[in-house]
Image (cartoon, rainbow, N blue to C red):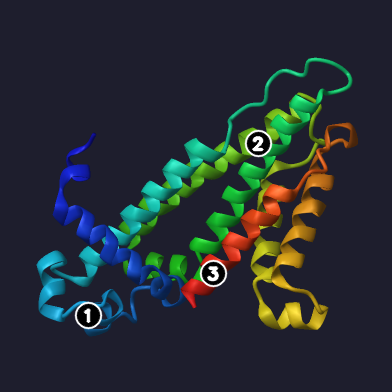
Amino acid sequence: MSETDCDPLFEKREKLVMRLMPYVQKHGFSSLKMDDAAKYMDISKPTMYKYFASKAEIAESIIDKFVLYVSNQMLAEAPPTLATEQSSLPSAEELKRYGVSFASAFKLTIKLSFYLTDVLLQDLSNSYPDLYAKLAGAVELCKNKLAAYIDSGVALGVFYPINARIYLTQVELVFRKLLDPKWLMLQNMTMKQALMDFYKTMRHQVFYEKWLDEDDSAMGAYFDALIAGMRAYE
């Protein structure tokens, strides 16, 4: 256990910066005033200064939170390799294993796209280049891990021979489009329907047919929770 895990001040700072994340995702840091920061944290300005001496310190705490999140997710949700193929026809257990690992990697890819918006990254690059470099480094390591996962599936003959970086970029860009309520309205689709159809499309694009596990019930529940979380950010 680290020292910060037992530090009440650290824990309080963590909770306070979490309340600011929806704002910085949408607007970045440069427009944030300390009065507004206190309001979003739901504390008085004098109380806020007990935890944060400046806006730069707030920004550093938020980016450290993002970096920790990305690093933990990279280890927990993106298996670096797949098990060696056992036979020409995969067993039900193997289908499930590869289906679950692909779902985990897909979830991580869309999480990166959701939390690290273009507005946040561009503003961070301009306002706090050192923090931007720190975050960009963590994200790049995570994407390398995801690309290695895709490449390992290709090498084992489970995935089609696709370009991993192009696949990750495709997921990121299309996912962001699916969050646009105007586009969804024009297509007469709900967000959950769009996300489920997108996931199925990506799965069929990546897997050879014999390796497809058609059970996507877990992803339906995951998207329900994701959408509920997004609405809480509004």
| Nearer to the camera, 191 or 34 | 191
The picture places residue 113, in percent across and down from the top left corner, at 57, 60
Image position of 120 (left or right of 92): left
Identify the residue at horizontal 29%, vertical 65% (top origin): 17
Identify the residue at horizontal 24%, vertical 34% (top origin): 1
SS assignment at label 3: helix
Q: Nearer the viewer, mark 1 or mark 3?
A: 3
Instruction: Using the image, determine if residue 116 lies above or below residue 203.
Output: below
Within 10 Å of disc 1 (Cα), the crowding (few <14, some 14-19, many 20+) is some
* Comes first in the chain, label 3 or label 2: 2
Within 10 Å of disc 3 (Cα), the crowding (few <14, some 14-19, many 20+) is few
Within 10 Å of disc 2 (Cα), the crowding (few <14, some 14-19, many 20+) is some
Q: Quadrant of residue 161?
A: top right
| Label 3 sits on residue | 230
SS assignment at label 2: helix
The picture places residue 101, in percent across and down from the top left corner, at 65, 36
The picture places residue 212, in percent across and down from the top left corner, at 83, 38
* Comes first in the chain, label 1 or label 3: 1
Image position of 56 (left or right of 65): left
Q: Nearer the viewer, mark 1 or mark 2?
A: 2
Image position of 103 (left or right of 187): left
| Nearer to the camera, 119 or 12 | 12
Q: Quadrant of residue 163?
A: top right
| Amino acid found under the numbered disc labelled 2 | Ser
| Nearer to the camera, 51 or 214 | 214
Whether tag 3 and tag 2 are in contact, CB under 8 A, the answer is no
Question: Which labelled disc corresponds to residue 101?
Answer: 2
Identify the residue at horizontal 69%, vertical 28% (top origin): 152
* Comes first in the chain, label 1 or label 2: 1
Image position of 59 (left or right of 79): left
| Label 1 sits on residue | 34
| Amino acid found under the numbered disc labelled 1 | Met
